[in-house]
Amino acid sequence: MKLLRVGPAGAERPALLDESGVLRDLSAVVGDIDGVLLGDGAAFGRVREAAGSAGELPAVEPSGLRVGPPVAGIGKVVCIGLNYHDHARETGGAVPEEPILFMKAPDTVVGAYDDVLVPRGSRKTDWEVELAVVIGRTARYLSSDEEASAAVAGYAVSNDVSERAFQLERGGQWDKGKNCETFNPLGPWLVTADEVADPQALGLRLWVNGELKQDGTTAEQIFPIAEVVRYLSQFMTLRPGDVINTGTPAGVAMGAPEPKPYLRAGDVVELEIDGLGRQRQELRDA
């Protein structure tokens, strides 16, 4: 299933994209697409049943309709740094022996087509196309990759926007450069795990002003998805609706030769992952 939320910010309603590409209203079936739904097998089953007879759901005219983040009420956004061999090489970073973790506040999450704000004082706002994992059941101290895979509700496209000067030149941890408002466009859809045959065989691409900047594959991940989920569960409890950004391939502005092409107001970023949809954001000043 391709699940999404549409409408004004703060007033989105649940929907699905059926097999013929028609947008269908799910409001009569479920209140929202959130951790409560993802962790409730019976409720999620009703959504699957509705998807199987999608023609009976009201069609929604998509023209002019905002697409919000596909998951509401996110508890936490956990991110993995330097998780692609090619990205580690381009930034001069050593291949980590264990996953590098940092957090993004849930309020950084916006819709796939919402504007991204360049922070005041920013000199190095950067892009990062990433595969996002959405958790579907409580996960703590998982002991195997099989258990980890079973905890995944689905996948989405994520743009882990970063301000590199804030992140690396202002002292402390990475959080300063990762938590600016609008710094995590997510979606447009949540694609359920059963529709992703192999999360380690997905192409990721990103363009800036029409120029291809990133063209990678999840096969380059240092720590595969199941290992990331299992590993995280040793340090924190993952709950339904939590999001994991699993790292970015080569091609970010920070890894480019001088002068590095960091983002400015007026730039347009587009990104996609095989089978998970496409995003588009315009940059404007905060």
Image (cartoon, rainbow, N blue to C red):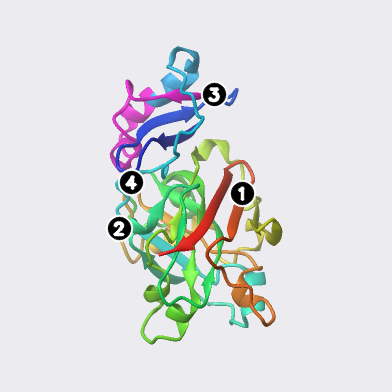
Other-residue count near label 1 (Cα within 10 Å), few / some / many at <14 / 14–19 / ≥20: many
* Mark 2 to mark 4 CA distance (whole Å): 10 Å
- Comes first in the chain, label 1 or label 2: 2
Q: Amino acid at mark 3?
A: Val
Quarter of the figure with the C terminus = bottom left
- Residue 32 in the image: state x and y as whole percent: 32, 34
Instruction: Determine the secondary structure under disc 2.
Output: loop
Q: Amino acid at mark 1?
A: Ile
Q: Which residue is label 4 attached to?
A: 240
Residue 107's label in the rendered image is none
Q: Nearer the viewer, mark 1 or mark 4?
A: 1
Residue 273's label in the rendered image is 1
Q: Which residue is label 2 attached to?
A: 237
As drawn, 69 above or below 266: above
- Comes first in the chain, label 3 or label 2: 3
Q: Amino acid at mark 4?
A: Pro
